[in-house]
Image (tube, rainbow, N blue to C red):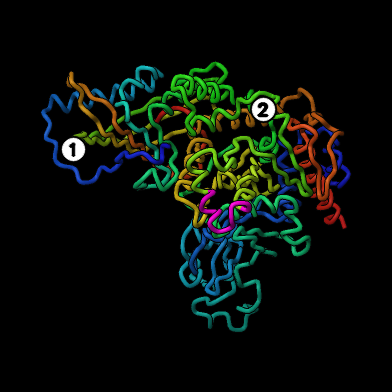
Amino acid sequence: MSTLPADLAALVRADSVHKRVYTDPDLFALEMKYIYGRAWIYVGHESQVPTTGDYHTTLLGDQEVILVRAADGQVHVLYNRCPHKGAKVVPEGDGSAGKFFRCPYHAWTFRLDGTHLAAPMKMAFEGTCFDPKHPDFSMRRVARVESYRGFVFASQATDGPDLQSFLGGVKSSIDNLCDRSPQGEVEVAGGVFRVLQRSNWKVFYENLHDTMHARVTHESSFTAAREKAAQLGEMPFELLIQDGNGEPYEFWEKLELRAYDNGHGYMAGIFNPGAADRDPVSRAHLAALSAVHGDERAREIMGMNRHNTVIYGSGSPHTVFQQFRVIRPLAVDRTLVEIQVFRLKGAPDAVFKRAMLYANIVNSPSSNVMPDDIEVYARCQQGNLANGGDWVSMHRYAGTDRPEPGGMVSVNGTSELPMRNQFAAWKQFMVSGAEQEVA
Amino acid sequence: MLLDLDFDVSTAALRPAPLSLETQRGVEQFLYREARLLDERRLAEWLTLWTPDGMYWIPRAHGQASPYDHISIAWEDAMLREVRVTRLANPRNWSQLPPTRTARLLGNLMVDGETAAGELVVRATFQLTEWRSSDVHQQLAGACTYKLKQVADGGWRLHMKRVDLVNCDAMLPNLEVFV
């Protein structure tokens, strides 16, 4: 396959995208270099590594990395590779390295910032080029690491915009998630789900702002919830969050989709628990926020009623139900979604319980809602291998998007603006990556 | 809310429950029947095996002590079990075309004792094959811990079914049917 910038550019039109972007392993390999090798990618939250030596492993594209807390309180992001024989220094998962990393193969040790500490029997290196001060003998750090309100991002490129410029219009979603805590701080708590999707990573990003699929794809789950609610004569929260997908097209049309540079965006909320007086949990939450900020500011925070936010390449924070669905491409047709749930420090316990309950019902592998999605993503993956046509349509309300600073806004909530915006960013990353490589 | 229930999931502090061979056999037959109803997808019948306030629980963490302070793969009361059954039967359930077929084996079935509330605690290990297509299938394994209540006719009802998967904390594909 050719990797000329012009060939990559030709895969994305203003209103459609070539199906190869979902199915071609060579393009996937290029994405790992040109998108995941350059963009700011969410690594994890600082609360996942609270004390010195704590680590959390994850993927930056196809790269296994370690988020670690050093003795000076700084967090670092290191490639999970010992410079001696290349062994992974820590196993997959969360744990503590103690005071330093120690490779399980030959006991080379490294400080928590990755720098070389010692190798056993070092007299054997005398007269060789072995130099503990040379970076070749340390665990390598990812080029750039920045934390925004506890959310740690890393970029494998030494140059490029800073994190906040990169986030642009969706920085406010991270702010709102944190501002919902009376202390302005959140922490990952209550466990994470990890769910496998048998499809390309980009399909999930598109679906996060795809309002036209809800009542079609989720028919079996929202009708089951509605049937039960009708029997009960009420709609408890557990059913309400499955019922929302059944709203008619007119409901979705009224939502607003915001699209920002670099593929990011968000959509206005659909469950509206930000109506701060509606239920006891929200009222208790409002009271806790009001005690700190006063009623006006508290209502402003809870009134920012966003549904899914997309941080392209990283995943989707959800401010109202306090979670971050971290999206990790595994292969051209395999995607891992890790669902982190956040506790709002200082908020009533019921707010955290509601977030866990939402995750149990919507994000668990055994959710009644999610299998509908995962099935249709897999059908796209498989269908796009058939010779039934080459292009994937994004025509809905194309040409009507209204520009605004740093991005665009939809004229209708069923617009495919988010997909067009994501692929505009994809094209920019891929073409500029290829151009730099050619140069 | 389901995370505010006053439902005791603990199976510690049991007292011995000496059962006659006949009663033990009745317990075994009840649990084998439960497994069979799931495998044969006789879900309406399966729903009747439960006490009205019984809970179905698949913890997300090994040794998870509580469903109230940690997420769970499943934490379902009668309402949510019925919603799942209704959904599974919907012809527009795209992810059940074709449906999930299962076959499970229960083994190492042992009566652990009796709770203060008089529920019988039974533990079994299981192997479960799930099959939808060559692309969607998995082998599940783990332990089931049951809290059983005896009813007037001498039969049993599920008051709690806790399923501890060997890979509960791993990356998982969909689990659409009851384990």
Q: Which mark is residue B114?
A: 1
Q: Is residue B39 visible?
A: yes
Which residue does the image show at 52% across and 59% down from the upper left? A47
Left or right side of A274 for A96: left
Vertical comparison of B113 with A77: above or below: above
1 and 2 marks on the same chain: no
Expressed as whole percent of the image width and height from the top left, the position of residue A212 reads: 69, 27
Q: Looking at the image, which is closer to me, B84 or A140?
A: B84
Expressed as whole percent of the image width and height from the top left, the position of residue A331 reads: 64, 42
Which residue does the image show at 84% across and 52% down from the upper left? A432
Residue A291 inside the magenta-drawn segment: yes
Question: Mostly what secondary structure, the magenta segment?
Answer: helix
Query: What is the spatial separation of the Cα atoms under label 1 and label 2, in whole angstroms?
Result: 49 Å
At label 2, which amino acid type do we have?
His
User: CB atoms at circles 1 and 2 under 8 Å apart?
Assistant: no
Q: Looking at the image, which is closer to me, B44 or A269?
A: A269
Expressed as whole percent of the image width and height from the top left, the position of residue A365 reads: 50, 36
Q: Looking at the image, which is closer to me, A78 or A220?
A: A220
* Region in magenta: A286-297
Left or right side of A302 for B172: left
Quarter of the rendering containing residue B106: top left
Q: Looking at the image, which is closer to me, A104 or B137?
A: B137
Q: Which residue in the protein does label 2 denote?
A: A213
Q: What crowding class fits label 2: few (fewer than 14 Cα within 10 Å), some (14-19), or many (20 or more)?
A: some
Residue A407 inside the magenta-drawn segment: no
Which residue does the image show at 73% across and 29% down from the upper left? A253
Q: Which mark is residue A246?
A: none
Tag 2 secondary structure: loop
